[in-house]
């Protein structure tokens, strides 16, 4: 009888154990191991199996999520400038595609900038069986702005798991940023931000996205709007219109003046910025340039405007000083 009773409780415990396991939500298992398993070495590009030791709070990373497989000259300039200024700290360019004909153009980077990694990654595999799995399938199936929304998800996913400084590819660094701790810009754009891995605020942003019902008509629903809602919920700001850096109470993050990374707005292009000539970079908005860590150009309005030599164009002035390798290859570089 005692033996039967013991066997009964063993069976009951086994059944309950199965039930408990079955009730567990999908969890983000070892991200590094999953990424490693998705990548193979390809034509001399150092791929993602090395990133685990590279991508950390001190890393700077970019995302090219269109799948076109190469960078135009302005985006390439952004990556080179970061690799130069952040050295020896790591700089990582995540790409959802790398075309073979473009690899030869990138090889000088991987040889000359030892702190730069080019990473090919499949978002579908990256997000599979994680909290982002459902949202990714919704985005892939419904998105009208697929490139932007995949990038919105990838940057938060990577910030949560690895931390680091995320920069849009239309952001050119002007000085080293290693002195900056976790931050958002005061205007709460998601194109420039830095967090430690599993930082409280980025975890809340991540969890909010994971639970979000996807709306393909909301261009910034996975970016600015989510960050704004989470920031308003947890952080106390004085709302001084971003005229000074401010430590957000209760959320352990600094909100930097918007012109810390000088935004070039659509009105600047409307007023003919690209028609203007400058002898030196300091002639362009000198009152803020001396303190700026970088310049954030408006992607949608300028992405197809090439860098033109000897015109005194703002992009040319920047390229000649901050990305001389890209500048030397013009106009042949993508």
Image (cartoon, rainbow, N blue to C red):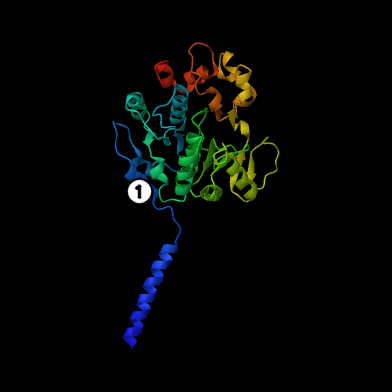
Q: Is residue 217 left or right of residue 139?
A: right
Residue ID at (35%, 28%):
99
The residue shown at (48%, 36%) is: 146
Check the picture and name the quadrant holding the N terminus. Answer: bottom left
Q: Residue furthest bottom?
A: 1
Q: Quadrant of residue 181?
A: top right
Q: Which residue is at the front of the view, 293 or 297?
A: 297
Q: Does the rendering let one see residue 266?
A: yes
In this rendering, is residue 17 above or below 58? below
Q: In the rendered image, which quarter contains the C terminus?
A: top left
- Mark 1 crowdedness (10 Å alpha carbons): few <14, some 14-19, many ≥20: few
Q: What residue does disc 1 label?
A: 33
Q: Is residue 214 above or below residue 64?
A: below
Question: Residue furthest toward the front?
Answer: 142
Which is nearer the eye, 15 or 94? 15
Question: Residue 27 placed where, x, y %?
Answer: 44, 55
């Amino acid at each position: 009888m005692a033996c039967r009773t013991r066997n009964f409780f063993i069976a009951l415990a086994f059944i309950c154990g199965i039930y408990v396991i079955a009730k567990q939500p999908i969890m983000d298992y070892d991200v590094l191991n999953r990424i490693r398993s998705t990548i193979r070495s390809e034509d001399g590009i150092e791929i993602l199996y090395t990133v685990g030791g590279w991508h950390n709070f001190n890393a700077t990373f970019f995302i090219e999520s269109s799948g076109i497989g190469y960078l135009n000259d302005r985006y390439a300039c952004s990556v080179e400038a970061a690799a130069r200024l952040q050295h020896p700290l790591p700089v990582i360019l995540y790409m959802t595609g790398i075309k073979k004909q473009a690899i030869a153009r990138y090889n000088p980077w991987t040889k000359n900038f030892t702190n730069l990694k080019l990473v090919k990654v499949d978002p579908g595999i990256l997000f599979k069986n994680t909290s982002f799995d459902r949202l990714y399938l919704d985005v892939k199936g419904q998105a009208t702005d697929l490139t932007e929304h995949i990038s919105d998800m990838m940057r938060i996913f990577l910030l949560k798991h690895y931390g680091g400084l995320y920069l849009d590819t239309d952001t050119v660094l002007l000085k080293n940023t290693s002195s900056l701790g976790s931050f958002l810009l005061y205007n709460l754009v998601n194109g420039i931000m830095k967090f430690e891995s599993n930082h409280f605020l980025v975890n809340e942003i991540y969890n909010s996205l994971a639970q979000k019902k996807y709306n393909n008509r909301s261009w910034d629903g996975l970016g600015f709007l989510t960050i704004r809602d989470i920031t308003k919920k947890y952080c106390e700001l004085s709302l001084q219109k971003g005229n000074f850096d401010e430590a957000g109470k209760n959320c352990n993050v600094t909100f930097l003046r918007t012109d810390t990374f000088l935004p070039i707005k659509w009105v600047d292009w409307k007023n003919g910025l690209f028609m203007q000539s400058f002898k030196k970079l300091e002639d362009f908005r000198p009152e803020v340039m001396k303190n700026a860590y970088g310049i954030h150009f408006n992607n949608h309005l300028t992405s197809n405007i090439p860098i033109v030599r000897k015109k005194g164009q703002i992009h040319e002035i920047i390229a000649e000083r901050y990305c001389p390798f890209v500048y030397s290859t013009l106009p042949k570089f993508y």
